[in-house]
Image (tube, grey):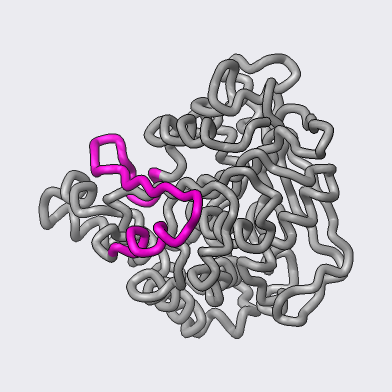
């Protein structure tokens, strides 16, 4: 947390916003889509700025939602907060109230590795969105001026737009598509899940030490997804460099992931598919993908097919450049905040 605070303080933000305080909200008897229940579901979240409302209850609140296996904390870094939240910037926290939750199964929110392991409720994206809604309303936010979702958070954006159609004025959906996760994307997720589950050390989720055989395979796939042909060629320009990189992955003796947490996070997308109800979306939508994104390859043409079905929507495909960072471009506002600034001018007056 000290590192997070330092990152924000380095922005030269007003004294009132020179913090990124994290706190917990507990939802009692949270009912999951699976029919399972937790007596207490912890939702960790961060806030910046101060909440204000007009006479009708509409507010200056902005919610930012992270991607799979991530958390809200990195949004305090200079690459994100440094581009959006400082004085005079697009979402200056002297004007906006920013809420950044850790999703179920992620960060400091309740997750399998807290103790329940593979007995933790089998959550879905719908459960994550419901918990976000419960959190916001509990802290007095009954309206969002803007929601920014990256990767998994991007998919949450589309669920929010259909489930709570009048709650959010504008959605910025970064690095996803409003369609079922299938093809190479689901294939990679399922491979990771099965590599871990089939590791003899996994023990049905009750492992006493990390199932490293499965986790090494998982990390190799994750690294491949995060790459692009240009990036890989620059980093591994010879056979020797490519071989040594591959061998290093097979010999890793530790992992940044907890096996159960990773399985749950990847499988939470299993019933995600907002495509059937796109015509019902009434909020304003801005969808931005990057052309070098391995996870959302533009050649599939999914966005071009689906966006025309959304009333107030615009799709932007960022071209490949020396600045884009494959799927991770979603967390580099310097490359897309201009589109968001234009988009915010189209939102209903506030």
Residue lying at the far left in this picture: please name it: 238
Residue drawn 51% across the image and 64% down it = 278
Kindly tell me whether residue 68 is visible in this rendering: no
Q: Residue at x 66, y 51 (%)?
A: 102
- Compared across the picture, whether 269 is left or right of 337 comes to right
Residue appearing at x 47%, y 63% in the figure: 178
Q: Vertical placement of 212 versus 319: above or below?
A: below
Say which quarter of the image contains residue 104: bottom right
Residue at 54%, 49% in the rendered image: 149
The relative height of residue 12 versus residue 37 in the rendered view (above or below) is above
Q: Which residues are magenta?
A: 301-329
Residue 169 in picture, x, y percent from top left: 63, 43
Q: Residue 290 in magenta?
A: no
Point out residue 72 in the picture as x, y percentages from the top left corner: 62, 45
Which quadrant, please, contains the C terminus?
Answer: top right
Q: Is residue 228 above or below residue 266?
A: above
Image coords of residue 159 (percent x, y)? 60, 62
Q: Quadrant location of the N terminus?
A: top right
Tell me where residue 112 sits by quadrant.
Answer: bottom right
Front position in the image: 236 or 83 = 83
Res 342 seen here: yes
């Amino acid at each position: 947390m000290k590192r997070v605070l330092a990152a924000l303080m380095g922005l030269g933000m007003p004294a009132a916003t020179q913090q990124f305080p994290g706190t917990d909200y507990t939802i009692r008897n949270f009912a999951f889509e699976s029919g399972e229940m937790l007596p207490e579901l912890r939702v960790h979240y961060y806030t910046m700025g101060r909440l204000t409302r007009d006479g009708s209850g509409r507010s200056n609140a902005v919610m930012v939602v992270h991607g799979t296996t991530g958390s809200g904390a990195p949004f305090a870094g200079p690459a994100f907060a440094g581009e959006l939240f400082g004085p005079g910037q697009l979402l200056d926290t002297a004007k906006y109230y920013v809420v950044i939750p850790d999703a179920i199964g992620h960060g400091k929110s309740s997750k399998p590795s807290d103790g329940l392991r593979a007995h933790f409720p089998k959550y879905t994206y719908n459960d994550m969105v419901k918990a976000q809604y419960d959190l916001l309303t509990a802290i007095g936010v009954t309206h969002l001026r803007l929601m920014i979702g990256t990767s998994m958070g991007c998919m949450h954006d589309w669920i929010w737009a259909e489930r709570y159609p009048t709650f959010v004025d504008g959605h910025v959906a970064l690095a996803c598509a409003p369609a079922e996760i299938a093809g190479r994307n689901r294939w990679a997720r399922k491979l990771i899940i099965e590599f871990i589950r089939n590791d003899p050390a996994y023990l049905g989720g009750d492992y006493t030490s990390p199932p490293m055989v499965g986790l090494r395979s998982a990390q190799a796939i994750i690294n491949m997804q995060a790459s692009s042909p240009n990036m890989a060629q620059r980093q591994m320009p010879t056979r020797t460099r490519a071989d040594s990189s591959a061998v290093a992955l097979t010999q890793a003796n530790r992992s940044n992931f907890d096996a159960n947490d990773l399985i749950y996070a990847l499988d939470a997308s299993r019933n995600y598919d907002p495509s059937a109800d796109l015509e019902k979306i009434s909020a304003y939508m801005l969808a931005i993908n990057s052309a070098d994104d391995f996870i959302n390859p533009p050649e599939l043409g999914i966005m071009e097919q689906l966006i025309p079905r959304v009333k107030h929507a615009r799709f932007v495909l960022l071209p490949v450049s020396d600045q884009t960072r494959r799927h991770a471009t979603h967390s580099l506002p310097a490359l897309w905040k201009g589109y968001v600034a234009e988009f915010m001018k189209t939102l209903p007056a506030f």
